[in-house]
Image (cartoon, rainbow, N blue to C red):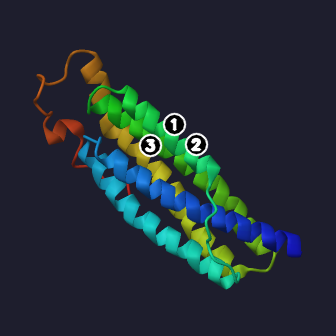
Amino acid sequence: MAGLKEMLVDQLKDAHSAERQAIQAMKKALRNTSEPQLRQGIEAHIAQSEEQRERVEQALEIAGAKAGRKVCEAMRGLVEEAQHEMEEQEEKGPVMDLVIIAAQQRIEHYEIAAYGTMAELAKATGQQEIAELLGRTLQEEKAQDEALTEVTRSAVLPAALAEENGEGEEEGEEAPAAKRGAARKPAGKR
């Protein structure tokens, strides 16, 4: 069982690094976001991710460990890919928002997989308190993924399609908030 507990600690250290990197990536993405719902959702998710990072620190403390300097290479790759994709876009707008959402959802799916595995590992090793902390984060990551899908359907894709079909506003003008669907629920905490 000691091997599994060591694996859990290693995974927690990886998750801590992943959360730190994800927070920084969201802050960068926020500068390129134009859709108000997406902006609000990312802002809320940054705050939520700070709480999740703190939960990982709490889980590590319960396990008798510290985060250390481990770097999550998977998150590093996801963040780098997102940066390259954003750099390929020439301007802010619905297409850039789609690029940001796609990158955010790849990150969410990675985190869902990681937290799901860690929660089960914690349960299997009798670390119920850690399992509960990780389970809460897992549910938040799933909700964030669903919220990103909703903002894509309700606001970003319709705006991108309208822009592609030449129905967008004149250059320099912003589409009215109602047209963008700003009255709908933001992609963030539910």
The correct choice, above or below, for 39 with respect to 119 in the image is above
The correct choice, above or below, for 109 with respect to 93 in the image is below
The correct choice, above or below, for 105 with respect to 160 in the image is below
Please tell me whether mark 3 sits on a helix, a strand or a loop. Answer: helix
Q: Nearer the viewer, mark 3 or mark 1?
A: 1
Instruction: Residue type at mark 2: give it.
Output: Gly
- For the point 53% across and 50% down, the residue is 108
Residue 189 visible to the viewer:
no
Find the residue positioned furthest to the top.
165
Residue behind mark 3: 149
Please tell me whether mark 1 sits on a helix, a strand or a loop. Answer: helix
Q: Pinpoint residue 190: horizontal percent, then vertical percent.
A: 40, 62
Q: Nearer the viewer, mark 2 or mark 3?
A: 2
- For the point 34% across and 54% down, the residue is 41
Residue behind mark 1: 81
- What is the spatial separation of the Cα atoms under label 2 and label 1, in whole angstroms? 6 Å
Q: Is residue 22 left or right of residue 132?
A: left
Q: Which quadrant of the rendered structure holds the N terminus?
A: bottom right
The answer to whether the residues at label 2 and label 1 have Cβ atoms under 8 Å apart is: yes
Using a 10 Å C-alpha cutoff, classify the residue at mark 1 as few (fewer than 14 neighbours), some (14 to 19) or many (20 or more): few
Circle number at residue 77: 2
